[in-house]
Image (cartoon, rainbow, N blue to C red):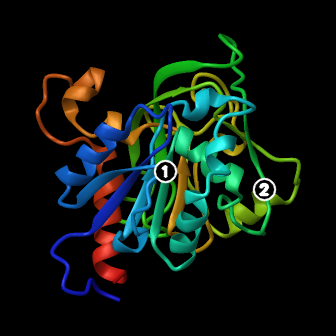
Amino acid sequence: MRLNNMKKPKIAVMYFPGNNCEEETRERCIEVGMEADIVRWNSKEDLSNYHGFIIPGGFSYEDRIRAGVIAAKEKIMESIRKEANNGKLLLGICNGAQVLVETGMIPGLSNKVEMALAPNTNPLVTGYYCAWINIKSIYKKTCAYNHLYDENEVIAMPIAHGEGRFVTKDKELAGKLIKNKQIVFRYCGNNGNIKDEFPINPNGSIYNIAAISNKEGNVMAIMPHPERASWQWQIPELKKGNGMASAIKVFESMKNYIEERMI
């Protein structure tokens, strides 16, 4: 359904203690023509007024116990889950992705946690790793976040996480995600080649997974940071440019999806 007497889609950027990318994330939403507010974890605000939600990166609750798990248990996540179950958009970036995996909303094939985001593994470090990488859009228009990407389009983004390696003990789960087209973005080389080796796969994630959506396509967890690579001046190779970069399409796709489908 289309927006009902609304000029712009409205996004709530959720803030938990320890997040550090909420302002940049809000700015990206506004830059593509959406309204956006930063909403605190202890807010009593009516979340039904929003068309979508983003949980940004950072280190909520200092990543105690394990990354994302405390935020995943906060009461406000019950309200966000309810809104997402009604078709509202929900994007988790980096720490936000960890939260969504801990809630079981990603991959969302059963009412339980099915995956984990384990410590990175690569020849340089086991744990926190920060670098510019490339990801590839595997499909076109399979979810709310790839609406404006071409199939096999390569996007430059940075990663900055210690626990970003998608893993699971369920040997059949990866096959289900592939069949359902839920693996939205995969780590790749500059020319789009996908190899399960460092530095193309920067953290050892199974199947080079950089982002997973739920089966319905309205919820996505992505470990790289699109909000840090949305303008050419943010990207080392393009830093003299003033235009938008391809990572901004994550937010533009959200706007497009909301305007086409949601109240």
* Amino acid type at image mark 2: Val
Q: Quadrant of the C terminus?
A: bottom left
Q: Is residue 237 above or below residue 231?
A: above
Residue underneath mark 1: 42
| The disc label shown at residue 113, or none | 2
| Helix, strand or loop for disc 1 | loop
Q: Nearer the viewer, residue 211 or 41?
A: 41
| Helix, strand or loop for disc 2 | loop
Q: Residue at x 64, y 34 (%)?
A: 164
Q: How many labels were placed on the picture? A: 2
Q: Residue 249's spot in the image, x, y percent? A: 31, 53
| The disc label shown at residue 89, or none | none
Q: Quadrant of residue 146?
A: bottom left
Would residue 146 appear left or right of 195 to someone viewing this image?
left
* Amino acid type at image mark 1: Asn
Give neighbour class at mark 1: few <14, some 14-19, many 20+ (Cα, 10 Å): few
Q: Residue at x 57, y 73 (%)?
A: 82
Q: Residue 107's spot in the image, x, y percent? A: 68, 60
